[in-house]
Amino acid sequence: MAGSPLKIAVLLSGSGTTLLNLIEQIAAGELDAQIQCVVSSRADAYGLVRAEDHRIPSALVPRKQFPGTATFSAAVWNEVRKFDVDLVVMAGFMSLLDVPEDFTNRIVNVHPALIPAFCGKGMYGHHVHEAVIAYGAKLTGVTVHFANANYDEGPIILQAAVPVLEDDTPDTLAERVQAKEREVYPQAIQLIAEGRVSVEGRRVTIREQ
Ligand code: GAR
């Protein structure tokens, strides 16, 4: 791979399996990126332990200690800006974040459904898969998108479908959707690392290699 690796900050709130996948894809040479820092919005996030295990600098910005999105976001950006960061990667980050001008279309998120279905406030993790099954949808999937200041709303980079099986439970469906996330999220970040992604309004174009 040519050029220098894409410098990323990873934001998380939970177990950090998404972070671990990125670490593994980088180690395998599939993702040309370097994780500069991890920021967690929760003190009990196991992702913080994973960061320490892999000697990645980490910071805790506990969401519940802030009165609102503005002060919380300022504290998160204060941590991110301590490092030289090209892209912010949300990896199970469960809080709204204000987007400073210079980070417009430089934050990515993965959502475990096909946006604009089964997304928005309260739709995260298992809630999504429960809602998909309860609705009777036959297809769900994974969406990687640029994050803006609203839940699950920014321009879509990649989507991949996952069929809903008749005997699926939220657990079995989550397992297959997460397997697909582990493929698609690093792919999308790699496209950005290769400079092949451009955005115009809501539409994302991916340049052929
Ligand atoms: C992932 O499955 C991700 O799709 C979902 O949270 C999980 C994080 O797992 N994100 C959302 O629901 C965002 N709306 P992790 O904490 O083990 O990385």
Image: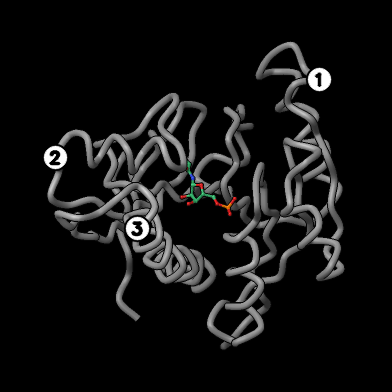
Q: What element does badge 3 sit on? A: helix
Residue carrying label 3: 172
Tell me the CA gap for discs 1 and 3: 35 Å
- Residue 196 figure quarter: bottom left
**Where, quadrant-wise, is the C terminus in this rendering?**
bottom left
Q: Amino acid at mark 3?
A: Thr
Residue carrying label 1: 65
**Residue 107 position within the rendered picture, expressed as x and y whole percent measured from the top left:** 55, 46
Tell me the CA gap for discs 1 and 2: 39 Å
**Residue 33 position within the rendered picture, expressed as x and y whole percent measured from the top left:** 64, 72
Residue carrying label 2: 136
Q: Along the horizontal axis of the image, is 102 left or right of 109?
A: right
Q: What element does badge 1 sit on? A: helix
- Residue 186's tag is none
Q: Is residue 92 above or below residue 163?
A: above
Towards the viewer: 17 or 31: 17
Q: Is residue 123 above or below residue 186?
A: above
